[in-house]
Image: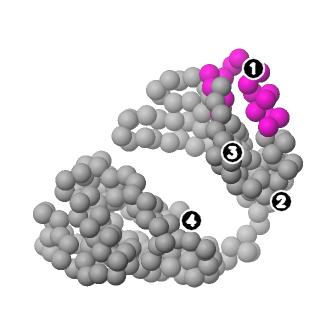
Amino acid sequence: MNIPLPPGTGDEGMLMVMERVVLPILKDWKPDYVINAAGQDNHFSDPITNMSFSAQGYAKLTELLRPDLVVLEGGYSIESALPYINVGLLLALAGLDYSKVQEPSGGPDRESQSKSMTEQVARVCAEVIDLWNHRSEVDLEEIFGTTSFFQRKRQIYYDTDNIHESQHEYIRLCSDCPGWRLIYTHSTKTRDLAAAVLLPWQPCQACRVEAREQHEKLITGDELSQVIWQEPFSNLRQSR
């Protein structure tokens, strides 16, 4: 579930999303485990992002989410954010008081989220939860078509290395498993065309065979600089 938020969103907006969208969906979904991929790029002091979350906000989010596991990910404000955020996360996980956790800059007088932005976040929340509540009414054939593969093109920007990647992806539409994927990709770093064949977790036998045949076909050609086979279930990743 992707929930796009406007630049400058602060604690109020992030926590609104948690309470109005994420927690209700988790209640419906009833996952076996909840993993918080605790990227910290959204902090107000991060040098390459433009959000406005605080250490207190991260701690409150963790308290609300009650994850089984927290995995630390991105975040580039090494001195001004990460130590305080991580302390807040640990205190929240332990059920201890985190109210005294405070960054050296951006205290209580820090500019709060504007009313117009709060209203915009509220509209996003309403739209996303409405989509979730009516998901069973969606005509999948209208969205994905009636062919064997769904195609999409994506442009990805890696901000830390200033790399643009272009992908053309084919997703196998399968009624027995999530379906295997074929991705053609090139970037501004190499400009060479590469491909990846990705199996889902627990693929059906038909998809496993079909994906392997596609991989074998790709590696026999010479138009691709690299062909990758990825099989998460067996932790297998092969590259030509």
The alpha-carbon separation of the residues under discs 4 and 3 comes to 23 Å
Looking at numbered disc 4 in the image, what kind of residue is underneath it?
Met
Q: Is residue 95 above or below residue 159?
A: below
- For mark 4, what is the residue? 1
Q: Residue at x 83, y 59 (%)?
A: 176
Question: Is residue 101 rendered to the left or right of residue 42?
Answer: left
Q: Residue at x 19, y 53 (%)?
A: 79
Looking at numbered disc 3 in the image, what kind of residue is underneath it?
Glu
Mark 1 surroundings within 10 Å by alpha-carbon count, few (fewer than 14), some (14 through 19), many (20 or more): few
Q: Please tell me the numbered disc located at residue 176.
A: 2
- Return the disc, 3 or 2, that comes first in the chain's sequence: 2
Q: Position of residue 82 (x, y in %)?
A: 26, 58
Q: Which residues are magenta?
A: 212-228
| Mark 1 residue element | loop
What is the image's colouring?
one colour
Q: Residue at x 66, y 41 (%)?
A: 236
Marks 1 and 2 in Cβ contact (< 8 Å): no
Q: Please tell me the numbered disc located at residue 231.
A: 3
Query: Can residue 65 be seen here?
Result: yes
The alpha-carbon separation of the residues under discs 3 and 2 comes to 17 Å
